[in-house]
Image (tube, grey):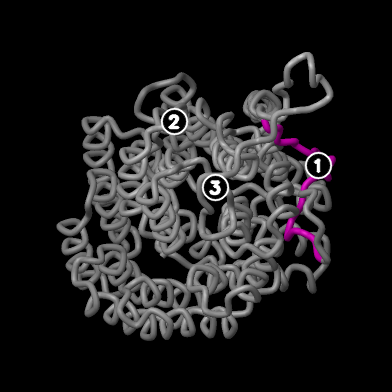
Amino acid sequence: MKRFSLVAMVAVCSLAYPSTGTAQNPPASVSEVRATTKDPASKKKASKNSAKATVPAPPPAQLFFGTIPVSTHSTEARTLSEKALDDYENVMLDESIALSKQATEKDPQFALGYAIWSFAARRDEPAPAALAKATALAANAPPEEQLLVRWMLATQSSDLLPAISLMNDMLQRFPDNKHVLYLSAEWLYFQQDYDRARKLFEKALQSDPKFPPSLNMLGYAYIETGDPDPAKAKAALQRYAELLPDQPNPHDSLGEILRFSGDDEGSLVEYHKALQISPTFYTSQLGMGETLTLMGKYDEARAEMDKAVAMAPSTRDKLHIEFQKVLVRFWEGKPEEGRKELVALEAKAKDANDGYAQYDIGLGRALLAENTDEELTLLSRLESTFSNPFNAMAEEDRHTALASILREEVRVLSQLGKVEAAQDEIHELETLARETRDTIIEDRYESARGYVLYASGDYAGAADELASDPQNPQVARQSILAYEKLGDKAQAEVDRTRWKYLRADTPQWFLAARAAAK
């Protein structure tokens, strides 16, 4: 289990961190920016009688994981924070948030405790109060704690350049710290920079060959690189399961990777194992339903998803599972029923005031519309909803959602041959990308331009721009078509190989797979 937010993070960064390889699809190189971390104590001057002397910085109270100096004098606060970070790395996000909250109760002045709280919460329900508290307290921490805190906070901004710079500084200061290596690699993975992420996950394993979090994420990275290797992905996750025999997540991850690879029977076996260990592990219960959907066992899929809804810990999770259940209607060839159910489910998400669910369901409803006129109408309504701030979604995520909606409008208009009509959305995407400096939005803008260039007959330009979003099945499918138009059969086959590992129970895969089968 990776447990992404509903608005998927899909940025590709060209980073200053030295690497022997390149990112799968890097944009223009980002100049190296170095962020310095200053110790406020070093600025305090001694009395006039000893003007040349400075007051030395006080020694750190304790060492976080035995290596990183931190400010807290509370052993309990440090221990709770260490456990919170352990839980975060092992995808136990709710537990991580709870423990980091407890750490701040033990020491209300502990910046790192608040930073871990906000860092874990960003994956689901952002915690702005914890972020603000960590920001306010960071200056009082030792330089090493400051650096980790500032990086955790910077990753929660749409402007990624400070996070890139601070990550580089962390890796330079702690080159062999498995936690720093893992956190950096995971963040790169969420930016879809799989090659660099893979290298750092592997380096963390060099520091500790029995480090489960890196094995888990390598299982995904090995199959989502430019050259997918399902055998290595499976081997990493099997090793992960051996290290944690009493945990459900290794089997949940194996279930997902095997489904990506087309081994549906093997996927079901692993999900069963996860549920035997933890009968209420709802992501595996949902995974059962999703795999059965792709196997064409639709009644069984719905029954498993009903069980997952009952297990789901939050309204948002329940809405997401109900959405996946509605998608079964389309797979079984009953789109009219599916569209009616989507209308009701979208209204339910609005009543719950959950912007993430509204986006997830609303975009799915538009993509699965009966015709392009209806699709454009629904996309236009979504654009109006997400064009203005509202308290049901964090601003950075709203911007990403809006960019995705605009890109889909461009896709439809371009496929209809209405290239001129798509220019307004292209311009809006360009402005949004420039103002936010968000690489996720830049990718949306570039892939939108790819659709326009393809419709205009510039297949080389289209292939280059469409490469910015290789994890969207529809964009990836369009890239294959561009290379086929260019007569580049070899590259088209490379892209087709990557594309087949995007196999999932989503509207995008449903539509792309159906188009490829024609």
Q: Which residue is mark 2?
A: 394
At label 2, counting other C-alpha atoms closer than 10 Å, the crowd grade (few under 14, some 14-19, many 20 or more) is some
Relative to 262, is 102 above or below?
above
The residue under label 3 is 9
> Sequence-wise, which precedes: disc 3 or disc 1?
3
Image height check: is 286 above or below 9? below
Q: Nearer the viewer, residue 149 or 17?
A: 149
* Prevailing secondary structure of the magenta residues: loop
Residue depicted at 34% across the width and 82% down the height: 245
Question: Residue drawn at (44%, 39%), measured in percent from left and top?
Answer: 118
Q: Which residue is mark 1?
A: 30
Image quarter for residue 263? bottom left
Magenta residues span: 21-39
Q: In the displayed structure, does residue 70 sit left or right of residue 37?
A: left
Q: Is residue 119 visible?
A: yes
Q: Is residue 153 magenta?
A: no
